[in-house]
Amino acid sequence: ESYKEKGYHSVAVSDSLTTDPETRSLVLIYVVEEGEKVSVKHIDFIGVQALDTDQIRKKLKTKEDNWFRGGDFKPSEFEQDQNIILTGYREVGFLDARIVDKEMIFSEDGKDLDIFITIEEGKRYYVGDLAWGGNELFADTVIARIATMERGEIFNDTRFALIRDDISAMYADRGYIY
C-alpha cells in the first residue's frame, strides 16, 4: 500500500527463506520490484451536464500529467476527490448526486492511466420557505440575519450547514450546548 500511495501500482514483492551457514539461523529476504510509476494521463466525466468538467478537474487532488506537473496516481487522494466532486454538486443544489462508476484503464506498459468517472446528477433543489420555531432566547429578526438563504435560490448544502452552525454557536455562547 505504501508503494501505491507513491504512484507505483505494479509493485511486486517476493520473499525467500535461507539459512545462514555461520550462525545457522534463518534469514528472510524480501525482493521488491517497484515497476514503473503510474501517471494519470486523462480524467473524464460521464453523465455530467450541470457542471463544467474543467472546473471539476481543477478542484481535484488527482491531476493529469502535463509538462509542468506530474500526474502520479495516489489512491487516498482519489478517494478524497470523490468527496470533492460530490461536495461540489451539493453546493449547486444537486443533493442526490452520486458517483455510480469509476473505471481505470491502464496502458499496456502499465505506466499511464485514464480515469473515467460516471456521475448521476439527480435533480436540482432550490430553497423553499424558511421557517423556525421555539426560539425564545433570540428574536426572529436575529435568526433571520443569520439565515440568509432566499426562497427560489439554488440550495447550497455547505452554506446551509454554516448557517446551522452559526445559529448553534449563538445558542452555545449563551450556555445552550445542545
Image (cartoon, rainbow, N blue to C red):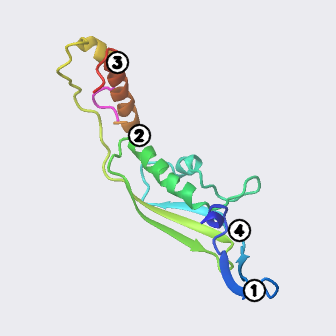
Mark found first going from the N terminus, 3 or 2: 2
53 is higher (above) or lower (below) than 32: above
In this view, which residue lies farthest toward the front?
23
Verify CB contact (< 8 Å) between mark 3 and mark 1: no
The image quarter in which residue 26 lies: bottom right
Task: Please name the residue shown 69% across and 85% down the image.
Answer: 16
Q: Is any part of residue 148 visible from this angle?
A: no
Residue beneath disc 3: 170
Amino acid tagged 2: Glu
Query: Horizontally, is 3 left or right of 175 in the view?
Result: right
* Residue 124 appears in the figure: yes
- The residue drawn where x is 73% and y is 53% is 69
Between discs 4 and 3, the one toward the N terminus: 4
Residue 89 left/right relative to 116: left
Q: Residues within 10 Å of mark 2 (few under 14, many from 20)?
A: some
Kind of residue sitting beneath label 3: Met
Give the residue pinned by disc 4. 37
Question: What kind of element bears circle 4?
Answer: loop
Whole-percent x, y for residue 121 in the image: 37, 53
Disc 3 versus disc 2: distance between alpha carbons?
A: 24 Å
Q: Secondary structure at mark 2?
A: loop
Residue 171: x %, y % from top left: 31, 19
Quadrant where the image shows the N terminus: bottom right
Which image quadrant is residue 126 in? Answer: top left
> Is residue 153 covered in magenta?
yes
Name the mark nearer the viewer: 2 or 1: 1
Q: Which residue is mark 1?
A: 24
- Tag in front: 3 or 1: 1
Query: Between disc 3 and disc 1, whose residue precedes?
Result: 1
Question: Which residues fall within the magenta stretch?
Answer: 149-154
